[in-house]
Amino acid sequence: MKPYVWHKQSISPDFELINCPSYDPIKDFHRDPTGVYVLIRCDIENASIEVAVCDPKHTIIKAFRGQKAQDLYVTIFEYEKKHQLKWFSRKDHIAYLGKELKKAEYGLLGKENYLQE
């Protein structure tokens, strides 16, 4: 294994490099126990990204609009916290939101067509 050199950090005696298996978005997907999910789309005409938060009954309960991924996910999580909501309980779903929003941001810039996974 190649020795790691990090600026001003030391390596723990318990350090371990873990190889990650490939993730299959169909086979490995698990719904969030809250039942909440998001729909994401680019609104090219208004130069914005829209995120709809849906409840387990498939009703859109809130929608957020912004131009950058970070603006959107920070606002969504702050809203969730401020109103003591429990929309996202799984960290992989939180990571998914960030990944999809970044893809939508590139789509908005015309770098690629955006289609939510």
Image (tube, grey):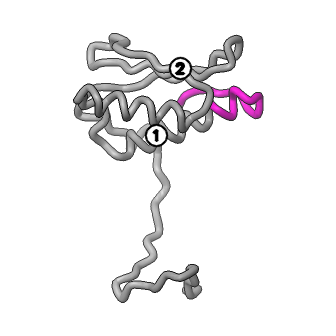
Spot occupied by residue 94 in the image (x, y as percentages of width and height):
40, 41
Residue type indicated by callout 1: Tyr
97 vs 47, left or right, is left
In the image, residue 104 above or below residue 46: below
Q: CA distance from mark 2 to mark 1?
A: 18 Å
* Residue at figure coordinates x 42%, y 25% from the top left: 38
Mark positioned earlier in the residue sequence (2 or 1): 2
Does the magenta segment cover residue 113? yes
Number of other residues with Cα within 10 Å of mark 1, as a class: few under 14, some 14 to 19, many 20 or more: few
| Numbered disc total | 2
In the image, residue 60 above or below residue 66: above
Q: Quadrant of the N terminus?
A: bottom right
Label 1 element class: helix
* Residue at figure coordinates x 62%, y 36% from the top left: 103
Q: Marks 2 and 1: CB-CB under 8 Å? A: no
33 vs 21, left or right, is left
Spot occupied by residue 97 in the image (x, y as percentages of width and height):
46, 36
Residue 7, quarter of the rendered image? bottom right
Residue type indicated by callout 2: Arg
User: What mark, if any, has residue 96 been given in the picture?
Assistant: 1
As rendered, which of 66 and 16 lies closer to the eye?
66
Q: Which residues, given as a range, are shown in magenta?
A: 105-116
Spot occupied by residue 76 in the image (x, y as percentages of width and height):
41, 29
* Residue at figure coordinates x 37%, y 12% from the top left: 60
- Dominant SS of magenta comes to loop
The residue that label 2 is drawn on is: 65
Label 2 element class: strand
In the image, residue 16 above or below residue 3: above
Residue 82, quarter of the rendered image? top left
